Image (cartoon, rainbow, N blue to C red):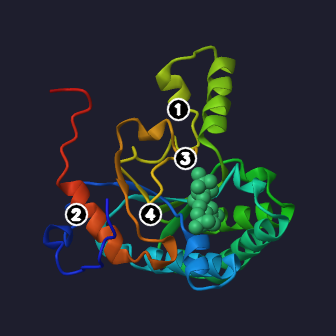
Amino acid sequence: MGDMPAQSGESAHLQDGGSGARHVAIIMDGNGRWAKKRGLPRSVGHQRGVEAVRRLVRGLGPLNLDCLTLYAFSSENWKRSEDEVDDLMNLMRKFIKSDLPEFVANDVELRIIGDWQSLAPDIVAMLEDALAQTANGTKKLAVALNYGAQHEIARAAAKAAANGEITAEAIEAQLDTSDLPPLDLLIRTSGEIRLSNFLLWQAAYAEMLFVDTLWPDFKPEHLAQALDDFARRERRYGGR
Ligand code: IPE
Ligand code: IPE
Ligand code: MG
């Protein structure tokens, strides 16, 4: 682990998208600490966090991923103060409004995982519209909203059971991620080394990378470097 300096020129084999990773997921953590370090309110950290998302989505082109999944709001984040939850929901509203046209123009296909249908009705409507407008995109951007992996697995198992088959394959087919590529790399920023109820099933054989960079400081170069690291790993899936 360690803070990753931004070094863009070093990922030679990545220029052709050669990392081999198709699906990367990121636990975007550290907005609050970023703000605290600067004596700013947490809300400013979240604003800068949104800017980091925008910058990353804009910089995705050369990285040749099929899917980027971002953990934006967990099912446990409701435990935060009402003010902070309101801030986060308002940022979400603003972000969809401001960035949807760019998603459409850049061929992004938005996906949402988690229990997003139980968010505020106006957000649900905005998300439905965003999903419809981006349905023909080719680069998947999955956003985890009101997401908790244990709940996702329980819901999937219940659906599998209703179909009369509780096997790993049948449960997997009912996960929110069932039509996303298999997870290759899971990154968490901010130095915390835990999954916080994110993609527990999907992470079974994913590679993991924990970096000290706080989310608002995270740049496309950091992702390129993470992919470089991923490209050097040997995945064995239990084989020898
Ligand atoms: C991540 O940053 C954003 C969300 C969880 C919504 P945090 O708000 O968790 O920032 P820290 O962990 O307090 O620094
Ligand atoms: C995980 O971060 C959730 C998101 C990044 C959206 P948290 O900051 O909520 O996780 P904990 O509480 O440190 O485990
Ligand atoms: Mg946190």
Instruction: Give the residue displayed 14% in from the left and 67% down from the top.
Output: 13
Tag in front: 4 or 3: 3
Asked if the residue under mark 2 is in contact with the one under mark 1, i.e. CB atoms within 8 Å, the reply is no
Q: Residues within 10 Å of mark 4 (few under 14, many from 20)?
A: some
Asked if the residue under mark 4 is in contact with the one under mark 1, i.e. CB atoms within 8 Å, the reply is no
Q: Which mark is residue 198?
A: 3
Considering only order in the chain, which callout, 2 or 4, is on the residue closer to the N terminus? 4
Q: Is mark 2 within 8 Å of ligand 2?
A: no
Q: Which mark is residue 96?
A: none
Report how far apart the C-alphas of labels 1 and 2 lie in the structure.
30 Å
Q: Return the residue at label 4.
A: 138
Report how far apart the C-alphas of labels 4 and 2 lie in the structure.
23 Å
Q: Is mark 3 within 8 Å of ligand 2?
A: yes
Considering only order in the chain, which callout, 2 or 1, is on the residue closer to the N terminus? 1
- State the residue in front, 169 or 10: 10
Q: Which mark is residue 228?
A: 2
Q: Quadrant of the C terminus?
A: top left
